[in-house]
Image (spheres, coloured by chain):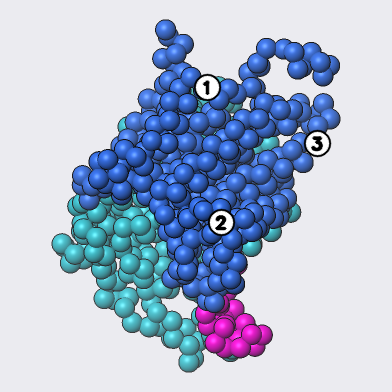
Chain colours: A blue, B cyan
Amino acid sequence: MQTTYESSAPSLLDHSLQLRWSLPVLALLAALPLLASLAGDTFYVGLATRVLIFALAATSLNLILGFGGLVSFGHAAFVGVGAYTIAILMQGGVVSAWAAWPIAMLVSAAAALLIGWVSLRTQGVYFIMITLAFAQMLYYLVVSLKAYGGEDGMPLAGRSSVGAGIDLGNDTQFYYATLAILVAAIVLITRLLNARFGHVLQAIRENEVRMTAIGFPVFRYKLVAFVLAGALAGLAGALLANQGSFVSPALMQWSQSGMLMIMVILGGVGHLYGGVLGAIVFLLLEEFLSHYTIHWQLGLGAVLLGVVLLAPNGLTSLFRRKGAAT
Amino acid sequence: MNTILILEQMLNGLQFGLMLFLLAAGLTLVFGIMDMINLAHGSLYMVGAYLIATIAQATGSFWLGLGFGIVGATVFGMLLEMTVLRRLYQRDHVSQVLGTFAILLMCNEGVRMIWGSQPLSLNPPAALSGPVELVTGFYYPAYRLFIIGVGLLVAGLLYLLIAHTRVGMQVRAGAANREMAMAMGTNVQRLFTAVFGVGAALCAVAGGMLGPLLAVQVGMGESILILAFVVIVIGGIGSIRGALLGALLVGIVDTAGRTLIPPSLGYLVGPEAASSAGPAVASILIYVLMAAVLFFKPRGLFPTHG
């Protein structure tokens, strides 16, 4: 059975990196700091870094929301846990990224393990709400941590150090580090989705009852996916804390979880690049509209509503429809 | 810690719980019957409160404001249903979240454009501004008693409507099995619009009642929306009875937690740490309650479907 499985053509459950157009985009992203400095406006490097970090967070949410069918409404909690881990470690004198970032991922993964273990017992809307409940608990926990800034948040001494001549304090180098991490995460997620684990996960999304009946340990698969997504969100949080050199409970507010969900839905649930596209469009739209008018939320709302009514499966479905037509 | 304080907190919890129930009732019906996640429900509450505050200021009468504000919010809710929300019923929860979040953003910004960012003030009617002596030595604000009365009255009316009328029967049938209700000849489209109108009216009542206690401002809908969701999840989605029980539980636990936790923490960790951590710990309490309920009863206390 395993051999026919391997030799068959890419199945519906396989996802391609679509190098034909993702490589040019990557080239463009790699050239961005250069273009920005030619244009004399390095502000855009910071904005682009922020977009890439949120792309990582949204992609990690898409792993469970899009491919596992788990609508988690508390994903920002893991981002926040990662960010706070960095901040607390830095206050304790741990500045090396090689130590702090993996620890941030581990702590977020541990939080996801505990939360997922309880939450995954519920289904559907109840799952949405219980993940929200846990995220709110972590939010208020952080607010109550007066030693770490409480409601006001706390500033970091600086960015993590990596050694080897790389200075993350330099915005351009930090941008490249973020880009490298995002690319690595996407490649890893693709490999994971095309492996047996990813196929089982997507099959569970399609028909959980049948997968249980066949004998797959459905709960364990969902939990592992949840923990992986939590760890990646923790990494995004680590990057976010580094970029702003500041952490605050606002990172973990429920509206942040909502925003990550919106990004994934906007980009395309269950599309490999859904999270990335959603983050880019959402944040650029926000940036653009807020320059244009103070009532930018009205425009943002109108655009989001338009997407829901006109592109039911997110923006990536527009590309797909175009591709199918030609 | 004496009996009067505890009595007062119980009444406060009851009052808050009943107002939560008004919000949760509409939300749970929309959720249960139309299977629709409506993040914009809090916006109806906000719009209702703004309309009531504006009309009350213009006419100088709280009651006129309340009456016209409720009518206005009902019309607004029904228009919203007929123009946009109707298109989202058949879609998955994820699209509904995105769509209603968009409406929430637009409502917030629309209100900010019309009324500005400054909070509006809404004064309780003069007749209800004083305290009332309930038991000898125990004074309680008359306005809060009035809120409790209104909450109980509306809950009773809603019970009569749902349990003893033909429309109520159709609503219950819709919550239990939508396809079957449609097959038996219920005009679902009209029913949906009506349910939405009732939900909006209940939101406006809650907005008008809480307006004088909390601030009438942009974003007032979001924080209370989360609580209303907690309530309906605890109660079981689609169940009015569950919403009432859930609302009272959340109202009392939240209010009692805010009063009782800081002093009791004081015994454990000292007054200084308690005063800083207390409010946050109290805020966690209702989420712990919800997680505990879902842990033991994954479909809420009164599951309606299947």
- Classify mark 1: helix, strand or loop: loop
Q: Amino acid at mark 1?
A: Gln
**What subunit carries mark 2?**
A
Residue ID for mark 1: A18
As drawn, the residue found furthest toward the bottom would be: B137
Measure how far apart labels 1 and 2 are at the Cα level: 34 Å
Q: What residue is at 74 percent from the left and 13 percent from the top?
A: A7
- Magenta span includes A92: no
The reply to whether callout 2 and callout 3 are in contact (CB within 8 Å) is: no
Taking depth in this image into account, of A287 and B137 the one nearest to the observer is A287
Q: Give the answer, above or below, for where B246 lies relative to B44.
A: below
Prevalent SS, magenta region: helix
Residue A40: x %, y % from top left: 25, 45
Residue A258 at least partly seen: no
State which quadrant residue B209 falls in.
Answer: bottom left
**What segment carries the magenta color?**
B257-286
- SS category of the residue bearing label 2: loop
Instruction: Please name the amino acid that badge 2 sits on.
Output: Gly
Q: In the image, what residue occupies the spot 36% across and 46% down?
A: A45
Q: Residue at x 72, y 44 (%)?
A: A223
Q: Which residue is mark 2?
A: A163
Q: Nearer the viewer, residue B71 or B40?
A: B40
Q: Nearer the viewer, mark 1 or mark 3?
A: 1
User: Mark 3, residues whose alpha carbon is within 10 Å: few (<14), some, or many (≥20)?
Assistant: few
Q: Is residue A319 visible?
A: yes
Picture disc at residue A132: none
The lab-note entry on whether marks 2 and 3 share a chain reads yes
The residue tagged 3 is A217
For marks 1 and 3, give the CA distance: 32 Å
Q: Position of residue A220 (x, y in %)?
A: 77, 41
Q: Chain of mark 3?
A: A
Q: Position of residue B164 (x, y in %)?
A: 53, 44
